[in-house]
Image: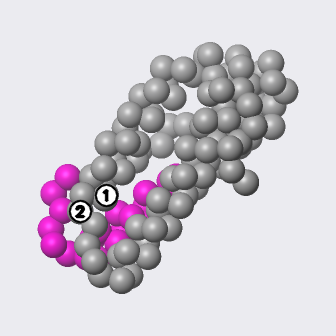
């Protein structure tokens, strides 16, 4: 495609060996939230393309998108499974899930070729 194709080579990796250390968990949440924001920003550039180019981009990147969504689902499950009741960690988790909702909304708009579901 053209130079408007965003780079989706993000690694949403969460440590598989969580200790009961809230600081490590908070840092993982911070990284995941930042990466989700970056991915959402990149995908929003695709939504600015003309519909025909959007559809072509989705078609060209369909396998990558499905793999990405599967990995994202796995990573978020890991995060939520390890969530603690600490107030700061809970706030960061809510922030991460909010960013994830924006990302899913953007992906949904691209995959179905329509406008985003939420503003």
Q: Is residue 25 left or right of residue 33?
A: left
Percent coordinates x, y for residue 36 in the rendering:
52, 52
Q: Residue furthest right?
A: 50
Residue 1 quadrant:
top right
The residue that label 1 is drawn on is: 79
Q: Is residue 113 left or right of residue 22?
A: right
For the record, the magenta segment spans 16-36
The residue that label 2 is drawn on is: 82
Percent coordinates x, y for residue 85 in the rendering:
28, 77
Q: Residues within 10 Å of mark 2 (few under 14, many from 20)?
A: some
Residue 58 vertical placement versus 94 (above, below): above
Residue 91 vertical placement versus 106 (above, below): below
Q: Identify the main secondary structure in magenta.
A: helix
In front: 108, or 39?
108
Inter-mark Cα distance, 1 to 2: 5 Å
Q: Residues within 10 Å of mark 1 (few under 14, many from 20)?
A: many
Q: Residue furthest bottom?
A: 87
Residue at image coords 42%, 28%: 67
Q: Is residue 22 left or right of residue 8?
A: left
Q: Secondary structure at mark 1?
A: helix
Percent coordinates x, y for residue 56 in the rendering:
70, 17
Residue at image coords 31%, 58%: 79
- Kindly indicate whether the residue at mark 2 contacts the one at mark 1 (C-beta within 8 angstroms): yes
Residue 106 quadrant:
top right
Residue at image coords 71%, 20%: 55
Residue 93 vertical placement versus 17 (above, below): below
Percent coordinates x, y for residue 118 in the rendering:
68, 50
In front: 116, or 35?
116
Is 17 part of what is drawn in magenta? yes
């Amino acid at each position: 495609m053209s130079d408007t194709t965003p780079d989706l080579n993000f690694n949403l990796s969460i440590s598989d060996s969580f200790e009961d250390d809230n600081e490590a968990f908070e840092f993982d949440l911070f990284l995941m939230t930042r990466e989700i924001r970056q991915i959402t920003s990149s995908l929003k550039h695709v939504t600015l393309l003309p519909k025909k180019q959007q559809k072509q981009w989705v078609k060209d990147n369909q396998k990558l998108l499905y793999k990405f969504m599967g990995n994202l689902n796995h990573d978020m499950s890991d995060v939520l499974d390890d969530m603690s009741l600490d107030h700061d960690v809970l706030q960061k988790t809510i922030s991460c899930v909010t960013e994830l909702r924006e990302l899913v909304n953007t992906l949904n708009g691209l995959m179905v070729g329509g406008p985003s579901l939420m503003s």
